[in-house]
Amino acid sequence: MNSLVRDDVDGGDADGGGAGRYRREELAQAAGVKVRNLRYYQERGLLPPPRREGRIAWYSEDHLTRLRLISDLLGRGYTVNGIGELLHAWEEGGGLSQLLGLERAMTRDWVQEEPVTMTLAELAELFGPAATAEDTRRAARLGYVRIDGDLVTHRSRRLLEATLTLVRQGVPLTEILDAGDLVQMQAAALADRFVGLFRRHVIGPDGLEHLSAAQLDHISEAASALRPVAGEVVAAEFARAMARRVEAEVAELLGSER
């Protein structure tokens, strides 16, 4: 990897933040909610108070998990009062910790990527004339990079290295981004299919509200088992498709030489 690329990890700073430890604004961003909504949930008792160190309030992964649960329930038509009653009932019955544990098991560890941060000038030097400012803006729209002032963070070192390899082999960056756009759409369709199968056949039609502790444990175990299986299925099928396509391309090239 080019020495210009720094090893800064996205989301951290000199004062704190980072994995499992959030300031208010960081927590809101990670959960996809507005800061004022976060404050409102705290005022209504839906969200426990943060832990304070001096004048700084720190939130944890449990706060993030509960925020995501609240957002999910709101999206399914529950009112704030209804969510409060539901959370209280789950807490009284001892089921909330299992439900939150299930959310963590189902959402964590799908993405295991190392972010890479550099300046815009370093990015330009890394790619050279192969990249334009519009390419960078498009990469940001596709979610590959995040631009913050003079800094740009690529979400995945592996994807960055793969892109650089293709560029150095002469593939235009614009066409690489076209392929990335297509891959994202196809990946979203595959994810929808896997999640639909899991929802119908593992969770069942009644959702989570009325499941027993044993059933929640079963779903958590099934979610953990699904994670590597989904990746292996996609990787295996893509490898088979590539083998067939490359074989056909080689045969056509050899045929054209005769």
Image: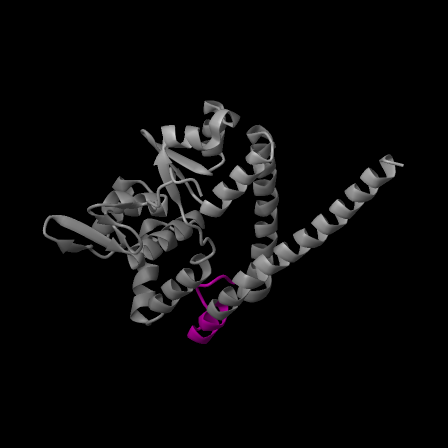
- Who's the residue at 56% across and 66% down the image? 202
Q: Considering only vertical position in the picture, is 245 above or below 234?
A: above
Q: Is residue 16 left or right of residue 205?
A: left
Could you say which is closer to the camera, residue 181 or residue 252?
252
Residue at the extreme right: 258
What is the x, y in percent for residue 154? 42, 40
**Res 112 visible:** yes
Q: Considering only vertical position in the picture, is 177 above or below 206?
A: above
Residue 195 painted magenta: no
The quadrant the C terminus occupies is top right
The coloring applied to the image is one colour
- Who's the residue at 43% across and 47% down the image? 75
**Res 205 visible:** no
What is the x, y in percent for residue 147? 37, 32
The residue segment tinted magenta is 206-219
Q: Is residue 175 left or right of residue 108?
A: right
The quadrant the N terminus occupies is top left
What is the x, y in percent for residue 232? 60, 60
